[in-house]
Amino acid sequence: EAGVAQSPRYKIIEKRQSVAFWCNPISGHATLYWYQQILGQGPKLLIQFQNNGVVDDSQLPKDRFSAERLKGVDSTLKIQPAKLEDSAVYLCASSLWAVWGSYEQYFGPGTRLTVT
Amino acid sequence: QQQVKQSPQSLIVQKGGISIINCAYENTAFDYFPWYQQFPGKGPALLIAIRPDVSEKKEGRFTISFNKSAKQFSLHIMDSQPGDSATYFCAATGRRTQGGSEKLVFGKGTKLTVNP
């Protein structure tokens, strides 16, 4: 079974520029998550999708971050404009959905963003 | 209420020794506690997980001990090997309510080094 795919793996941009990350979840996984992992810390959820609907985006800085999941499969996360503090690894994860819950989240390799 | 506190921040053990990492939580709504292993440049990988209806779960050399009354859980790695050298994250999440999030709340991580 193929894992969660992410691209690009690395990105370096200047502050105030924009950037987009792409994620392809495991086939059949209805739930998709974007996490931000700052160096030396655990991942922090930015947004959770159930199919193509948003379940939780309470920690997404909506003034600069946006995400979409068209057709309930692939997802993109965009930052515009980027700030220095956005330097982090952006992780995509996916999980199966069930009525009782779907807790086993599988992570992709992440995109390391450096903002200069 | 949403925090998961993890200790120690770093751990050095000799090959064949036992590695122990501890986590504590406050939110009594949490009902799923996974441990993730992360190698440099990789996304977190699910290692083992436990639900609060059991006090211990063992998979190979990895054991989770869970103390519901103390709101603590720990990871024990028996016969630690140099290949176990990685960063370990504990996490927690709660049962999905209608439309609710299943976001994982992560600890800050423990960098384990196993010396040969």
Image (cartoon, rainbow, N blue to C red):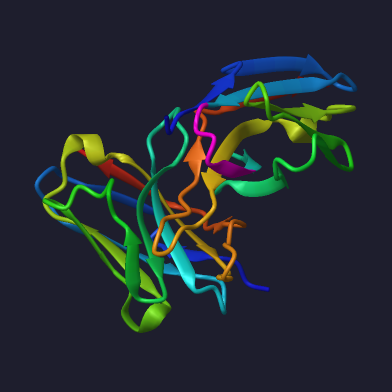
Camera-nearest residue between B30 and A83? B30
User: In the rendered structure, does residue A82 fall within the stretch colored magenta?
Assistant: no
Quarter where residue B7 is shown: top right
**Would you place residue B23 above or below residue A50 in this image?**
above
Q: State the residue at coordinates (40%, 79%).
A: A72
User: Residue B87, percent across and down?
Assistant: 61, 32
Q: Quadrant of the N terminus of chain B?
A: top left
Q: Is residue A92 left or right of residue B11?
A: left
Q: How far from the left and from the top, in percent, is residue B111? A: 61, 25
**Residue B115 visible in the picture:** no
| For residue B59, side relative to residue A71 (left or right) | right
The magenta-colored residue range is B26-32
Q: Residue at x 27, y 49 (%)?
A: A58
Is residue A56 placed above or below B106 in the rendered structure? below
Does residue B17 appear to the left or right of B75 in the view shown? right
Q: Quadrant of the C terminus of chain B?
A: top right
- Of residue B11 and residue B99, the one placed in the foreground of this image is B99
Q: Position of residue B95 (x, y in %)?
A: 54, 53
Specify the quadrant of the image occupied by residue B6.
Answer: top right
Q: Residue B74 vs residue A72: left or right? A: right
Q: Looking at the image, which is closer to me, A29 or A11?
A: A29
In this view, the residue in front, A95 or A86, is: A95
Residue extending farthest bottom: A71
Q: Which residue shows up at 56% across the image and 72% down it?
A: A26
Q: Is residue B30 magenta?
A: yes
Q: Position of residue B10 (x, y in %)?
A: 61, 17
